[in-house]
Image (cartoon, helix red, strand yellow):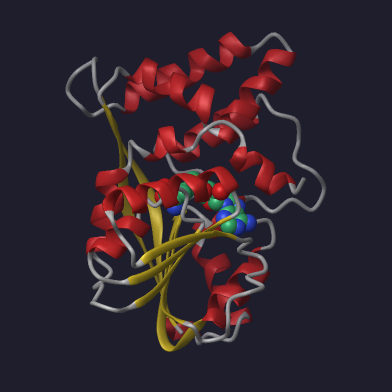
C-alpha cells in the first residue's frame, strides 16, 4: 500500500482530532464562508474544518487519503444531518476526478502538507481552484518551539532516517518554500501571504494521559514508539515527550490539557 496512506490509516486519528475542534471552528470563522460557496477541504481527516464549513452553508467536498477517516467524517456529517457535505478518498498529489476551476475555496489544515510531492500538491490545489478563488492552508513550522514541531524533533531522534528523496512535510511551514511551490504552479508572488497563527490542543485529561493518545492513536507517533521500542528506548521517548507536554500545558491544572501550537497560515489568491 502507498506508505502515505498506510501512515494515516494506522491508529485512529479521530482521537486526536477530537482535541482540536474549537481551533478548527476558529480557523473556519476567519474564512468568510458564505451560503453556497463551493469548498474543497483537502486532507480533511474526519472533518475538523469541513463540518464547520458546511454548518456555515458552504457546499463542501472533503478529500482524504485515509479510508477510515473518510468513513468517520461521513458518519459525523450524517449524524448532524449535513447534506451539503460529502467525503471521498483521494490523494492531494493527484486529484484525478476533480475538474479544473471547480472550487471557490480550497482549504487544507495540516492535511496537504503531509502528501509526498509538494510541487504536485500546489499544482493540483491551483488547478481545481477557479480564477479569483482562494487557497488557505495551515502548516506546521519546522524548528518551532511549540508542541508539534517539538514532537517531530524528539521523535526523529528515535526513528530511522527517512528514505532517500523524502521531503519533510514541515517544509510547507517555510515561507520561501510556499512561495516557490505556488509560483511554480502559476500564482503571482504578490498573491501569496503567510502569517503565524495558533491552534490549541485541548483535552479533559492530564498531559501525560494526553500523550498516551498520541502514542496509541497518532500514526507518526506510533511509528516513533515502534522504532524506539525496537531499540529498547520506548520509555526514554515517553519521558522526553512527557516533559514536553507538561512544560507546554497552559490549562492551569495538572488534570487537564491545553497546549497552544504555532503554525503558518497561508493565503493564496488564485
Ligand atoms: C494531521 S491530520 C489533519 C486532519 C484534519 N485536517 C484536521 O485538522 O483534523 C492529516 C490528514 O492529512 C491526510 N493526508 C495525508 N496525506 C494525504 C494525501 N496525500 N492526500 C490527502 N490527504 C492526505 C491524512 O489522512 C490526515 O487525515
Check the image and report above or below for 202 versus 53. Answer: above
Residue 186 can be seen in this image? yes
**Where does residue 144 sit, x and y in percent of width and height?**
45, 44
Looking at the image, which residue is at 33% across and 36% down? 19
139 to the left or right of 229: left
Looking at the image, which residue is at 46% across and 87% down? 130
Place residue 181 in its image quadrant.
bottom right
Check the image and report above or below for 98 versus 14. Answer: below
Check the image and report above or below for 117 versus 153. Answer: below
Place residue 244 in its image quadrant.
top left
Task: Pick the quarter of the image with the N terminus.
Answer: top right
100 to the left or right of 77: right
Looking at the image, which residue is at 25% across and 24% down? 204
Looking at the image, which residue is at 61% across and 13% down? 234
Looking at the image, the residue that sits furthest to the bottom is 131
Please state the total of marks drawn on the protein image: 0
**Where does residue 248 sit, x and y in percent of width and height?**
33, 28
Residue 114 can be seen in this image? no
- Most foreground residue, 94 or 158: 94
**Where does residue 94 sit, x and y in percent of width and height?**
67, 69
Looking at the image, the residue that sits furthest to the right is 164
**Where does residue 169 sit, x and y in percent of width and height?**
59, 52
Amino acid at each position: 500500500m502507498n506508505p502515505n496512506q498506510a501512515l494515516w490509516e494506522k491508529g485512529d486519528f479521530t482521537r486526536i482530532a477530537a482535541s482540536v475542534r474549537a481551533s478548527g471552528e476558529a480557523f473556519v470563522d476567519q474564512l468568510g464562508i458564505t451560503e453556497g460557496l463551493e469548498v474543497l477541504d483537502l486532507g480533511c481527516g474526519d472533518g475538523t474544518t469541513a463540518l464547520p464549513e458546511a454548518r456555515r452553508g458552504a457546499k463542501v467536498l472533503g478529500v482524504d487519503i485515509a479510508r477510515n477517516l473518510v468513513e468517520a467524517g461521513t458518519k459525523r456529517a450524517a449524524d448532524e444531518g449535513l447534506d451539503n457535505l460529502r467525503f471521498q478518498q483521494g490523494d492531494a498529489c493527484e486529484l484525478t476526478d476533480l475538474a479544473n476551476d471547480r472550487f471557490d475555496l480550497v482549504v487544507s489544515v495540516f492535511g496537504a502538507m503531509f502528501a509526498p510531492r509538494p510541487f504536485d500538491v500546489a499544482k493540483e490545489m491551483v488547478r481545481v481552484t477557479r480564477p479569483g478563488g482562494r487557497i488557505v492552508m495551515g502548516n506546521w513550522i519546522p524548528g518551532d518551539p511549540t508542541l508539534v514541531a517539538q514532537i517531530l524533533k524528539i521523535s526523529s531522534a528515535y526513528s530511522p532516517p527517512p528514505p532517500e528523496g523524502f521531503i519533510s512535510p514541515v517544509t510547507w511551514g517555510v515561507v520561501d518554500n510556499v512561495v516557490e511551490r505556488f509560483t511554480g504552479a502559476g500564482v503571482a508572488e504578490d498573491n501569496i501571504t503567510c502569517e503565524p497563527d495558533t491552534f490549541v490542543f485541548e483535552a479533559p485529561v492530564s498531559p501525560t494521559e494526553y500523550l498516551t493518545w498520541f502514542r496509541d492513536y497518532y500514526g507518526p507517533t506510533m511509528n516513533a514508539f515502534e522504532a524506539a521500542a525496537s531499540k529498547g528506548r520506548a520509555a526514554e521517548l515517553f519521558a522526553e515527550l512527557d516533559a514536553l507536554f507538561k512544560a507546554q500545558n497552559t490549562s492551569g491544572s495538572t488534570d487537564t490539557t491545553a497546549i497552544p501550537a504555532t503554525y503558518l497560515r497561508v493565503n493564496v489568491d488564485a
